[in-house]
């Protein structure tokens, strides 16, 4: 497979603090690559290094085979993207913004501009000034700008911010289409595993400036699915905890006045409910929780590493 | 290059859509037209004639007061004389003669409606006449028998002059006045032949251009200013000593200075011929300052505009985040920076052109087209003129150098601080406080280092167009006189340093 983006031993410090510590990964053509990590993990810093906002202290970044350091303009010409929020010129219309951006790239025709406007569904409002747009519309406009020049590498930093559920679905479809049909390498960052699950082919998990692991999303989910957090809504909680401690004490992740969260395999759930019921605990419900970032961390690092 | 042009085009699009640009340029137009209209009003109200009338009244009162006081003094002397004797008496007698002479002069002036303290030829004639009369009275007080031949001759010439001056005053005969003045110069034994020649030449110029100075009561007429310039330049050339820059202890002339003086004479003669307002009278001549006044109002607005645009150019984009679409585009940062700089310069030049066109049209409609004075300069002792419109246009662009310096300063602060308020505020503060504080400081300090202060190297217009009356005025106030070459080199280095600091900071620093 063709690696469109290649990071080799990249490090970055702000002052004395090391923000990115020796990370390496590759993004291939035709895949949606997820960049998963909590806030402050270094996702945006990495993306800013790839897009030329920040200098690279150590290591190298290659885009489509061109070094970012040596062939800056060539390397950058393959990139399209949104970093943090899509910020464009507010006093200008969406169309003018797109036209200005098109001017900086080779071979963007007016037809292509119209085409991307249609792709993101902005044809009715593209001539209005940017300051009248909602956050969702700005996102759409930003996406239109990012894909305008048919980049080989599309980078989107938290792209679902401000989008409504149908907007998120649309975005997901657009990204999948771009990757799978037009062979674009897509790098998406997020702190939500649930979002990554639906969007990505592979994910890298990053925390405290280090990459903890890179896995195909299906594999990750399978691992996570093995031990999913279940929420037992019971009464009295204290007594239930007391009862469960000997066998499941290590697996309790959270307890409140109303519920206990336990990370267990699905087949253990009926065992626990029976056990509790026979010991006189009232059970009001058992819910399977969405796999969380914490679960993914536990899965990818074998429990040795947590977010905190 | 193609990419740079694309970036530049984008910058121009961004600037033209800014509300601040439209507002400031509208203010500029309103200010320029408003100033012109105001001046039209001032000009038509003819304020100077009422001033003149008040002046006349005041002068008459002054003379009356003086006459009264002289009369009192004479009475005083009369009473003292009775008790005095010997040397004391002689002293009192001679004082009496002088006071009587002065009194007669004032009475005579009043009778002929002449103000004896002006530069009008009639006033000079009256003064010289009574000087001669004093000589006569003094000689007459001595018994005729004890006069020697010399004194008798002097008495006769004095009498002769008095009767000639009386004729001048009676007939208001300027030509006769000049011929008397020439005769007196010729008779003066203190002058060398060359000096006599110079003074007579000045008189010939007065006669040629009819410089009677009659209408000027309190100030030197423009023509008189030029004639004196010519005279002192000629005198310096004759003695080979530089009396102009240092009249008290003149230094010998260099060949460069000689050339300069010859050019000065040529320019003064040309201005005399054209009747151009001199630097001494520029403040009283409303018309001659309207056009440059309009331009400087407009230039100030352009300066403000560029300070705001440059001071926000980088910082504003960073704070709003719109810089992101620039950074993510395949353009090196130096190209982005250069495009910004070029677009700012373009805005400055285009608004200057707009200003010029508005000024020419407004001024032309209100005061008539091509009514201003041309610029006079001289090369190798021959005077040339630069037509009014071309000259004013050139001035606009020499003033633009100063605007560029402040613009680059604002741009530098904008990139360094990444804070629009700080960079725009600081630039405006430096502009206002700096230049004023500097001119104040220059009055108290001396030393070679003063020439390295930026504010002493910004006024290119007064330096390049030094013969302009306005420039003469500001050059006379300016105590630090750097050469043009020094100023050019200094400003180039300054611009390079500020520009490079901004460029380096923008190209290398992270955008977080």
Image (cartoon, coloured by chain):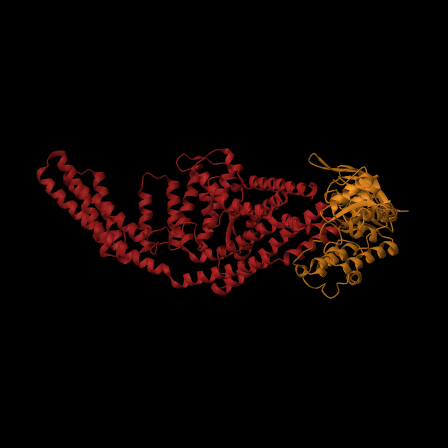
For this rendering, which residue is in front, B151 or A82? Answer: A82
Q: Is residue B440 above or below residue A84?
A: above
Using the image as rendered, state which of residue A24 and residue B187 is in the foreground. Answer: A24
Say which residue appears at 56% left-offset and 54% top-offset. B302
Can residue A158 be seen in this snapshot? yes
Where's the C terminus of chain A, which quadrant? Answer: top right
Query: What chain is colored orange?
Result: A
* Snapshot quadrant of residue B452: top right
**Number of numbered discs on residues:** 0
Left or right position of B181 against B259:
left
Question: Where, by quadrant of the figure, is residue B509 drawn?
Answer: top right
Q: Horizontal and vertical percent for residue B279?
A: 43, 50
x then y, percent, for residue A21 = 77, 37
Q: Colour of chain B?
A: red
Left or right of B14, for residue B433: left
**Quadrant of residue A138 in the image?**
bottom right
């Amino acid at each position: 497979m063709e690696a469109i983006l290649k990071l080799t031993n990249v490090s970055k410090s702000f002052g004395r603090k090391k923000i990115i510590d020796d990370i390496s990964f590759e993004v291939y053509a035709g895949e949606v690559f997820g960049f998963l990590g909590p806030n402050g993990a270094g996702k945006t810093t990495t993306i800013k290094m790839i897009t030329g906002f920040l200098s690279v202290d150590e290591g190298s970044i290659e885009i489509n085979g061109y070094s970012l350091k040596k062939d800056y303009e060539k390397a950058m010409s393959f990139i399209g993207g949104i970093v943090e929020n899509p910020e464009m010129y507010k006093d200008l219309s969406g169309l003018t913004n797109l036209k200005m951006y098109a001017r900086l790239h080779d071979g963007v025709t007016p037809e292509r501009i119209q085409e991307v406007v249609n792709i993101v569904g902005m044809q009715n409002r593209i001539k209005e000034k940017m300051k009248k747009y909602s956050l969702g519309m700005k996102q759409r406009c930003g996406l239109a700008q990012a894909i305008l020049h048919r980049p080989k590498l599309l980078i989107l930093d938290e792209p679902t911010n401000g989008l409504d559920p149908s907007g998120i679905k649309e975005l997901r479809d657009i990204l999948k289409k771009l990757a799978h049909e037009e062979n674009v390498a897509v790098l998406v960052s997020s702190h939500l595993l649930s979002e990554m699950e639906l969007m990505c082919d592979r994910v890298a998990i990053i925390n405290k400036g280090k990459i903890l692991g890179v896995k195909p999303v299906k594999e990750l989910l399978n691992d996570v699915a093995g031990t999913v957090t279940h929420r037992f809504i019971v009464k009295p909680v204290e007594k239930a905890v007391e009862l469960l401690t000997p066998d499941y004490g290590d697996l309790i992740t959270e307890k409140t006045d109303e519920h206990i969260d336990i990370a267990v395999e699905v087949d253990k759930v009926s065992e626990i409910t029976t056990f509790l019921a026979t010991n006189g605990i009232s059970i009001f419900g058992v819910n399977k929780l969405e796999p969380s970032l914490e679960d993914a961390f536990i899965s990818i690092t074998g429990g040795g590493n947590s977010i905190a | 290059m193609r990419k740079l042009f694309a970036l530049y085009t984008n910058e121009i699009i961004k600037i033209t859509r800014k509300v601040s640009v439209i507002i400031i340029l509208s203010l500029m137009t309103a200010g320029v037209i408003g100033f012109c209209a105001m001046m039209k009003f001032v000009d038509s109200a003819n304020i100077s004639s009422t001033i003149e009338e008040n002046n006349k009244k005041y002068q008459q009162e002054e003379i009356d007061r003086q006459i009264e006081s002289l009369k009192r003094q004479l009475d005083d002397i009369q009473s003292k004389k009775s008790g005095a004797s010997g040397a004391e008496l002689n002293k009192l007698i001679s004082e009496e003669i002088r006071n009587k002479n002065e009194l007669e002069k004032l009475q005579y002036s009043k009778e002929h409606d002449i103000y004896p303290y002006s530069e009008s030829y009639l006033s000079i004639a009256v003064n010289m006449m009574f000087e001669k009369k004093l000589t006569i009275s003094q000689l007459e007080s001595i018994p005729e028998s004890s006069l020697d031949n010399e004194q008798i001759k002097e008495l006769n010439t004095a009498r002769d002059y008095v009767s000639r001056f009386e004729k001048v005053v009676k007939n208001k005969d300027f030509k006769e006045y000049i011929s008397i003045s020439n005769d007196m110069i010729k008779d003066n034994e203190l002058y060398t032949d060359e000096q006599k020649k110079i003074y007579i030449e000045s008189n010939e110029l007065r006669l040629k251009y009819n410089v009677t100075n009659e209408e000027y009561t309190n100030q030197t007429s423009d023509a008189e200013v030029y004639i004196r310039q010519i005279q002192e330049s000629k005198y310096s050339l004759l003695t080979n000593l530089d009396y102009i820059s240092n009249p008290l202890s003149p230094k010998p002339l260099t060949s460069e200075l000689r050339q300069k003086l010859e050019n000065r004479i040529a320019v003064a003669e040309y201005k005399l011929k054209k009747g151009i307002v001199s630097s001494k009278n520029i403040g009283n001549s409303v018309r001659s300052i309207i056009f440059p006044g309009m331009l400087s109002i407009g230039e100030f607005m352009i300066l403000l505009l560029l300070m705001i645009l440059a001071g926000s150019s980088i910082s504003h984009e960073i704070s709003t985040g719109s810089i992101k679409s620039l950074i993510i585009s395949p353009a090196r940062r130096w190209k982005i920076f250069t495009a910004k700089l070029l677009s700012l310069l373009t805005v400055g030049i285009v608004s200057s052109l707009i200003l010029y066109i508005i000024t020419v049209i407004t001024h032309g409609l209100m005061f008539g087209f091509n009514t201003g004075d041309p610029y006079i300069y001289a090369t190798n002792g021959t005077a040339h003129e630069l037509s009014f419109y071309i000259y004013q246009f050139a001035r606009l662009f020499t003033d633009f150098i100063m605007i560029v310096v402040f613009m680059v300063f604002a741009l530098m602060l904008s990139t360094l601080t990444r804070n629009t308020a700080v960079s725009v505020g600081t630039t405006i503060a430096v502009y206002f406080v700096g230049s004023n504080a500097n001119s104040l400081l220059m009055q108290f300090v001396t030393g070679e280092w003063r020439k390295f202060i930026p504010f002493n190297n910004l006024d290119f217009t007064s330096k390049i167009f030094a013969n302009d009356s306005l420039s003469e005025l500001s050059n006379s106030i300016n105590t630090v006189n750097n050469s043009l070459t020094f100023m050019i080199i200094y400003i180039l280095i300054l611009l390079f340093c500020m520009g490079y600091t901004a460029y380096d900071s923008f190209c290398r620093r992270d955008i977080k």
